[in-house]
């Protein structure tokens, strides 16, 4: 009796092992179990500009996170020595499993030359303005509108009329979402979107007279060069209006509040999403909001223009800038 039970148990174990082996073979053939593969998945990284600090930080964090996995990477930077035609040829010759594009230009060219390859993007300004394919995934460049506007109202309460300058070519979709969120939060969005470069100063002065706070978003037409950025910040200080914006790069100009996505976190988040794509996992949110944020409050600048902040909100702030 005992011998028979042992035999039956042994047969059950053998059947279970065979079943598991069969399932693993099927998954392997589907590309879901790369651990047994001789060749790791190949990721082709396309960088819009290697000199941009944010792009560099995203790339380094992405690669560092991938090193914990079994993947190989090939890099291509768009510059005077590397043309879009060369990119097209390299994608065909390398035949990557995934293309990771950093920046708007890289995303556009990857979409153009990537054929049917899965594309993952990061750091693309207002990704909604680009065409979106079924096999495109990404990490948004900005935090959600709800996060940005809610934090602004929490840290700087009472400043309900928010001015924003933008070019519809780059930010129509993002501003449409901002209008909706502003209404829900009881804020008023005052827009400046029709201007010429030579009349921007006059238009900004007129806008500043109508608002409590200026919100600078990522927009290549508005923030076209250093001189324009300095003019906007100088005018804002003259009119004693604080500026909230999206990058610590503007702190030296006199930004009052920075609400930014944390760049290294974006890179790690993109690497994790890349793994999910390569493993053919079901992805509910194909374009994800940045998981980390960095909030900086320039108390020195606020004191200069006599604007009060909510002291109870300091727990939500990562960095406080005081006068030296």
Image (cartoon, rainbow, N blue to C red):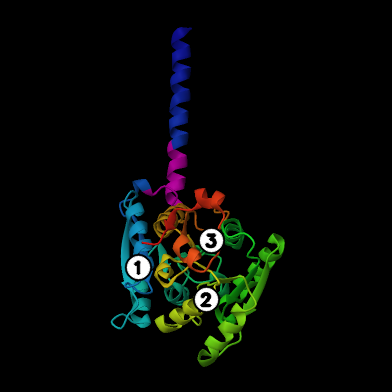
* Residue 157 in view in this figure: yes
Looking at the picture, does residue 226 appear above or below residue 15? below
Q: Earlier in the sequence, mark 2 or mark 1?
A: 1
Please give the name of the residue rendered at 37% of the width and 70% of the height, measured from the top-left corner.
Answer: 46
User: In 3D space, how far apart are the residues under numbered discs 3 and 2 (Cα atoms)?
Assistant: 24 Å
Residues 203 and 125: in front is 203
| In-image side of 274 versus 289 (left or right) | left
Q: Earlier in the sequence, mark 1 or mark 3?
A: 1
Q: Position of residue 255 (x, y in %)?
A: 47, 68
- Figure disc tally: 3
Looking at the picture, does residue 67 appear above or below residue 137? above
User: In 3D space, how far apart are the residues under numbered discs 1 and 3 (Cα atoms)?
Assistant: 19 Å
Residue 25 on the magenta segment: yes
Residue 236: give its label: 2
Mark 3, other Cα within 10 Å: few <14 / some 14–19 / many ≥20: many
Give the main secondary structure, helix, strand or loop, of the magenta stretch: helix
Please give the name of the residue rendered at 50% of the width and 75% of the height, measured from the top-left corner.
Answer: 237
Q: Position of residue 51 (x, y in %)?
A: 32, 73
Find residue 17 and report its image quarter: top left
Q: Earlier in the sequence, mark 3 or mark 2?
A: 3
Q: Quadrant of the C terminus?
A: bottom left
* Residue 95 in view in this figure: no
Residue 53: give its label: 1
Task: Give the extent of the magenta segment.
Answer: 21-34
Q: Residue furthest top?
A: 1
Residue 143: give its label: 3
Please give the name of the residue rendered at 59% of the width and 75% of the height, measured from the top-left corner.
Answer: 164
Residues 235 and 30: in front is 235
């Amino acid at each position: 009796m005992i011998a028979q039970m042992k035999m039956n148990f042994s047969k059950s174990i053998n059947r279970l092992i065979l079943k598991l082996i069969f399932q693993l073979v099927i998954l392997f053939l589907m590309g879901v179990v790369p651990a047994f593969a001789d060749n790791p998945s190949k990721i082709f990284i396309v960088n819009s500009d290697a000199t941009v600090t944010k792009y560099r930080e995203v790339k380094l964090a992405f690669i560092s996170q991938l090193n914990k996995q079994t993947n190989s990477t090939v890099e291509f930077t768009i510059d005077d020595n590397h043309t879009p035609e060369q990119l097209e040829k390299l994608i065909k010759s390398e035949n990557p499993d995934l293309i990771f594009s950093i920046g708007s230009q890289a995303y556009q060219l990857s979409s153009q030359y990537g054929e049917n390859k899965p594309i993952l993007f990061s750091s693309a300004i207002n990704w909604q303005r680009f065409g979106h394919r079924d096999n495109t995934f990404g990490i948004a460049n900005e935090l959600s509108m709800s996060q940005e506007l809610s934090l602004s109202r929490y840290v700087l309460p009472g400043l309900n009329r928010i001015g924003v300058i933008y070019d519809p070519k780059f930010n129509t979709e993002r501003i449409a979402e901002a209008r909706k969120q502003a209404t829900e939060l009881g804020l008023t969005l005052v827009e400046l979107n029709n201007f010429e470069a030579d009349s921007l100063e006059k238009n900004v002065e007129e806008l500043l007279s109508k608002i409590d706070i200026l919100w600078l978003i990522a927009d290549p037409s508005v923030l076209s060069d250093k001189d324009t950025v300095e003019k906007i910040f100088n005018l804002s200080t003259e009119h004693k209006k604080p500026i909230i914006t999206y990058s610590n790069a503007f702190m030296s100009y006199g930004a009052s509040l920075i609400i930014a996505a944390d760049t290294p976190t974006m890179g790690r988040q993109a690497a994790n999403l890349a793994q999910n794509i390569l493993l053919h996992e079901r992805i509910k949110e194909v374009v994800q909001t940045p998981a980390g944020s960095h909030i900086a409050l320039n108390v020195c600048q606020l004191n200069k223009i006599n604007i009060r902040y909510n002291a109870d909100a300091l727990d939500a702030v990562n960095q406080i800038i005081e006068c030296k």
